[in-house]
Amino acid sequence: MTESATHDEAHGGALGERLNWLRAAVLGANDGIVSTAGLVVGVAGATTERSTLLAAGLAGLLAGSMSMATGEFVSVSTQRDSEKAALAMERQELREQPEAELQELTGLLMDRGLSRRVAREAAIQLTERDALRAHASVELGINPDALTNPWHAAWASFLAFTAGALLPLLAIVLPPQTVRLPVTVASVLAALVVTGWTSARLGAAKPARAVLRNVAGGALAMGITYAAGTLLRTVGA
Protein backbone atom coordinates (compact mmCIF):
# COMPACT_ATOMS: atom_id res chain seq x y z
CA MET A 1 0.00 0.00 0.00
CA THR A 2 1.60 3.27 -1.16
CA GLU A 3 1.70 6.48 0.84
CA SER A 4 -0.42 8.15 -1.86
CA ALA A 5 -3.09 5.47 -1.59
CA THR A 6 -3.15 5.79 2.17
CA HIS A 7 -3.42 9.58 1.86
CA ASP A 8 -6.33 9.31 -0.59
CA GLU A 9 -8.09 6.76 1.61
CA ALA A 10 -7.76 9.03 4.63
CA HIS A 11 -9.21 11.94 2.71
CA GLY A 12 -12.02 9.76 1.39
CA GLY A 13 -12.88 8.56 4.89
CA ALA A 14 -12.80 12.10 6.26
CA LEU A 15 -15.03 13.32 3.44
CA GLY A 16 -17.50 10.50 4.07
CA GLU A 17 -17.57 11.34 7.78
CA ARG A 18 -18.19 15.03 7.05
CA LEU A 19 -21.00 14.15 4.66
CA ASN A 20 -22.59 11.91 7.29
CA TRP A 21 -22.45 14.70 9.86
CA LEU A 22 -23.88 17.19 7.36
CA ARG A 23 -26.70 14.80 6.44
CA ALA A 24 -27.49 14.26 10.13
CA ALA A 25 -27.54 18.03 10.68
CA VAL A 26 -29.96 18.55 7.79
CA LEU A 27 -32.25 15.79 9.04
CA GLY A 28 -32.11 17.18 12.59
CA ALA A 29 -33.09 20.62 11.33
CA ASN A 30 -35.87 19.04 9.30
CA ASP A 31 -37.21 17.32 12.42
CA GLY A 32 -37.14 20.63 14.26
CA ILE A 33 -39.06 22.36 11.47
CA VAL A 34 -41.78 19.73 11.13
CA SER A 35 -42.36 18.96 14.81
CA THR A 36 -42.37 22.59 15.95
CA ALA A 37 -44.49 23.70 12.99
CA GLY A 38 -47.04 21.03 13.77
CA LEU A 39 -47.11 22.10 17.41
CA VAL A 40 -47.48 25.85 16.92
CA VAL A 41 -49.94 25.52 14.04
CA GLY A 42 -52.04 23.19 16.16
CA VAL A 43 -52.02 25.65 19.04
CA ALA A 44 -52.85 28.45 16.58
CA GLY A 45 -55.97 26.51 15.67
CA ALA A 46 -57.05 26.65 19.30
CA THR A 47 -56.02 30.18 20.29
CA THR A 48 -54.76 33.46 18.89
CA GLU A 49 -52.91 34.51 22.04
CA ARG A 50 -49.30 35.34 21.10
CA SER A 51 -48.00 34.50 24.59
CA THR A 52 -49.60 31.05 24.43
CA LEU A 53 -48.12 30.40 21.01
CA LEU A 54 -44.69 31.52 22.20
CA ALA A 55 -44.85 29.36 25.32
CA ALA A 56 -45.96 26.31 23.36
CA GLY A 57 -43.31 26.85 20.69
CA LEU A 58 -40.51 27.33 23.20
CA ALA A 59 -41.59 24.27 25.15
CA GLY A 60 -41.64 22.21 21.96
CA LEU A 61 -38.24 23.56 20.89
CA LEU A 62 -36.57 22.81 24.22
CA ALA A 63 -38.22 19.42 24.68
CA GLY A 64 -37.43 18.36 21.13
CA SER A 65 -33.82 19.56 21.13
CA MET A 66 -33.11 17.96 24.51
CA SER A 67 -34.75 14.73 23.42
CA MET A 68 -32.68 14.68 20.22
CA ALA A 69 -29.47 15.45 22.10
CA THR A 70 -30.11 12.83 24.79
CA GLY A 71 -31.03 10.16 22.26
CA GLU A 72 -27.96 10.89 20.16
CA PHE A 73 -25.71 10.89 23.22
CA VAL A 74 -26.99 7.50 24.37
CA SER A 75 -26.79 6.02 20.87
CA VAL A 76 -23.27 7.27 20.12
CA SER A 77 -22.04 6.34 23.61
CA THR A 78 -23.17 2.77 22.97
CA GLN A 79 -21.41 2.81 19.60
CA ARG A 80 -18.21 4.17 21.17
CA ASP A 81 -18.29 1.52 23.90
CA SER A 82 -18.65 -1.16 21.23
CA GLU A 83 -15.73 0.26 19.26
CA LYS A 84 -13.52 0.38 22.35
CA ALA A 85 -14.46 -3.20 23.25
CA ALA A 86 -13.67 -4.38 19.73
CA LEU A 87 -10.29 -2.63 19.81
CA ALA A 88 -9.49 -4.17 23.21
CA MET A 89 -10.34 -7.63 21.87
CA GLU A 90 -8.20 -7.05 18.79
CA ARG A 91 -5.30 -5.85 20.93
CA GLN A 92 -5.50 -9.02 23.03
CA GLU A 93 -5.62 -11.27 19.96
CA LEU A 94 -2.59 -9.53 18.46
CA ARG A 95 -0.69 -10.09 21.68
CA GLU A 96 -1.68 -13.74 22.14
CA GLN A 97 -1.75 -15.05 18.54
CA PRO A 98 0.17 -12.70 16.24
CA GLU A 99 0.69 -15.24 13.44
CA ALA A 100 -3.01 -16.10 13.24
CA GLU A 101 -3.83 -12.40 13.11
CA LEU A 102 -1.30 -11.91 10.31
CA GLN A 103 -2.96 -14.72 8.36
CA GLU A 104 -6.34 -13.13 8.98
CA LEU A 105 -5.15 -9.75 7.72
CA THR A 106 -3.69 -11.42 4.63
CA GLY A 107 -7.01 -13.09 3.91
CA LEU A 108 -8.91 -9.83 4.33
CA LEU A 109 -6.58 -8.08 1.88
CA MET A 110 -7.03 -10.96 -0.58
CA ASP A 111 -10.78 -10.50 -0.28
CA ARG A 112 -10.21 -6.94 -1.48
CA GLY A 113 -8.63 -8.17 -4.68
CA LEU A 114 -4.93 -8.54 -3.90
CA SER A 115 -3.00 -11.63 -4.89
CA ARG A 116 -1.77 -13.89 -2.10
CA ARG A 117 1.84 -12.73 -2.48
CA VAL A 118 1.00 -9.03 -2.52
CA ALA A 119 -1.55 -9.42 0.29
CA ARG A 120 1.00 -11.24 2.45
CA GLU A 121 3.64 -8.58 1.87
CA ALA A 122 1.16 -5.76 2.53
CA ALA A 123 -0.04 -7.49 5.72
CA ILE A 124 3.52 -7.83 6.98
CA GLN A 125 4.32 -4.18 6.28
CA LEU A 126 1.10 -2.94 7.84
CA THR A 127 1.67 -5.11 10.92
CA GLU A 128 5.23 -3.86 11.35
CA ARG A 129 4.07 -0.26 11.07
CA ASP A 130 1.03 -0.48 13.38
CA ALA A 131 -0.69 -3.84 13.78
CA LEU A 132 -3.67 -2.58 15.76
CA ARG A 133 -4.36 0.26 13.34
CA ALA A 134 -4.15 -2.11 10.39
CA HIS A 135 -6.63 -4.59 11.85
CA ALA A 136 -8.90 -1.83 13.13
CA SER A 137 -9.08 -0.29 9.67
CA VAL A 138 -9.25 -3.40 7.47
CA GLU A 139 -11.12 -5.79 9.76
CA LEU A 140 -13.27 -3.54 11.94
CA GLY A 141 -13.61 -0.37 9.87
CA ILE A 142 -12.54 1.73 12.87
CA ASN A 143 -10.03 4.55 13.13
CA PRO A 144 -8.56 4.23 16.66
CA ASP A 145 -7.70 7.95 16.68
CA ALA A 146 -11.17 9.09 15.64
CA LEU A 147 -13.69 7.20 17.74
CA THR A 148 -17.20 8.57 17.69
CA ASN A 149 -17.70 11.33 20.27
CA PRO A 150 -21.11 11.29 22.02
CA TRP A 151 -20.77 14.90 23.19
CA HIS A 152 -20.13 16.16 19.67
CA ALA A 153 -23.10 14.19 18.39
CA ALA A 154 -25.37 15.44 21.17
CA TRP A 155 -24.46 19.10 20.62
CA ALA A 156 -24.81 18.74 16.85
CA SER A 157 -28.29 17.27 17.21
CA PHE A 158 -29.30 19.92 19.76
CA LEU A 159 -28.15 22.79 17.55
CA ALA A 160 -29.58 21.34 14.33
CA PHE A 161 -33.01 20.75 15.87
CA THR A 162 -32.99 24.20 17.50
CA ALA A 163 -32.07 25.92 14.24
CA GLY A 164 -34.91 24.18 12.45
CA ALA A 165 -37.43 24.79 15.23
CA LEU A 166 -36.70 28.52 15.40
CA LEU A 167 -38.16 29.12 11.94
CA PRO A 168 -41.78 28.10 12.63
CA LEU A 169 -41.59 29.56 16.14
CA LEU A 170 -40.59 33.01 14.89
CA ALA A 171 -42.97 32.79 11.94
CA ILE A 172 -45.96 32.18 14.22
CA VAL A 173 -45.23 34.87 16.85
CA LEU A 174 -43.71 37.78 14.91
CA PRO A 175 -46.27 38.57 12.14
CA PRO A 176 -49.65 40.20 12.83
CA GLN A 177 -52.48 37.85 13.71
CA THR A 178 -54.20 38.21 10.33
CA VAL A 179 -51.24 36.80 8.37
CA ARG A 180 -49.66 34.67 11.10
CA LEU A 181 -50.85 31.31 9.82
CA PRO A 182 -50.17 31.75 6.08
CA VAL A 183 -46.71 33.19 6.80
CA THR A 184 -45.89 30.19 8.99
CA VAL A 185 -47.17 27.63 6.50
CA ALA A 186 -45.40 29.27 3.57
CA SER A 187 -42.08 29.63 5.37
CA VAL A 188 -42.21 26.06 6.69
CA LEU A 189 -42.98 24.58 3.28
CA ALA A 190 -40.18 26.64 1.70
CA ALA A 191 -37.74 25.42 4.35
CA LEU A 192 -38.84 21.81 3.77
CA VAL A 193 -38.11 22.22 0.07
CA VAL A 194 -34.57 23.26 0.97
CA THR A 195 -33.96 20.47 3.50
CA GLY A 196 -35.53 17.86 1.23
CA TRP A 197 -33.39 18.94 -1.72
CA THR A 198 -30.24 19.09 0.41
CA SER A 199 -30.72 15.67 2.01
CA ALA A 200 -31.40 14.13 -1.41
CA ARG A 201 -28.25 15.65 -2.91
CA LEU A 202 -26.14 14.49 0.02
CA GLY A 203 -27.53 10.98 -0.42
CA ALA A 204 -27.08 11.08 -4.22
CA ALA A 205 -30.83 10.60 -4.71
CA LYS A 206 -33.27 12.38 -7.03
CA PRO A 207 -34.28 15.67 -5.37
CA ALA A 208 -37.80 15.94 -6.81
CA ARG A 209 -39.17 12.87 -5.07
CA ALA A 210 -37.46 13.68 -1.77
CA VAL A 211 -38.74 17.27 -1.84
CA LEU A 212 -42.28 16.10 -2.59
CA ARG A 213 -42.24 13.62 0.29
CA ASN A 214 -40.80 16.21 2.65
CA VAL A 215 -43.27 18.93 1.76
CA ALA A 216 -46.24 16.55 1.77
CA GLY A 217 -45.29 15.20 5.19
CA GLY A 218 -44.90 18.68 6.66
CA ALA A 219 -48.16 19.90 5.14
CA LEU A 220 -49.99 16.84 6.45
CA ALA A 221 -48.57 17.35 9.95
CA MET A 222 -49.65 20.99 10.02
CA GLY A 223 -53.06 20.20 8.57
CA ILE A 224 -53.82 17.50 11.13
CA THR A 225 -52.64 19.50 14.13
CA TYR A 226 -54.47 22.64 12.98
CA ALA A 227 -57.68 20.64 12.57
CA ALA A 228 -57.21 19.18 16.04
CA GLY A 229 -56.63 22.64 17.53
CA THR A 230 -59.66 24.07 15.77
CA LEU A 231 -61.78 21.20 17.04
CA LEU A 232 -60.63 21.81 20.60
CA ARG A 233 -61.45 25.50 20.32
CA THR A 234 -64.92 24.67 18.97
CA VAL A 235 -65.59 22.16 21.73
CA GLY A 236 -64.30 24.56 24.36
CA ALA A 237 -66.53 27.33 23.06
Image (tube, rainbow, N blue to C red):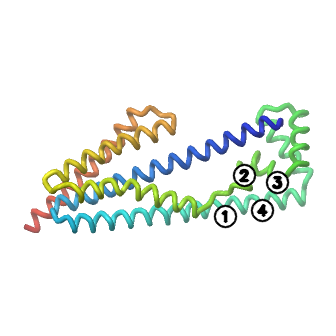
Pick the front one: 12 or 230: 12
> Which residue position is annotated with label 3?
132
Q: Residue at x 79, y 35 (%)?
A: 4
Residue mark closest to the camera, 4 vs 3: 3
On the rendered image, what quadrant is the C terminus found in? bottom left
Mark 4–mark 3 contact, CB under 8 Å? no
Q: Nearer the viewer, mark 2 or mark 4?
A: 2
Q: Name which of mark 2 and mark 4 comes first in the sequence.
A: 4
Residue with the mark numbered 4: 88
Write the residue at 17% across / 65% down. 49
Calculate the distance from the C-alpha at mark 4 to the C-alpha at mark 3: 10 Å
Classify mark 4: helix, strand or loop: helix
Left or right side of 170 for 78: right
Q: Amino acid at mark 1?
A: Asp
Q: Which amino acid does the dot numbered 2 rest on? A: Asn
- Reply above or below: 53 against 184: below
Residue under numbered circle 2:
143
SS under mark 3: helix
Q: Is residue 115 left or right of residue 237?
A: right
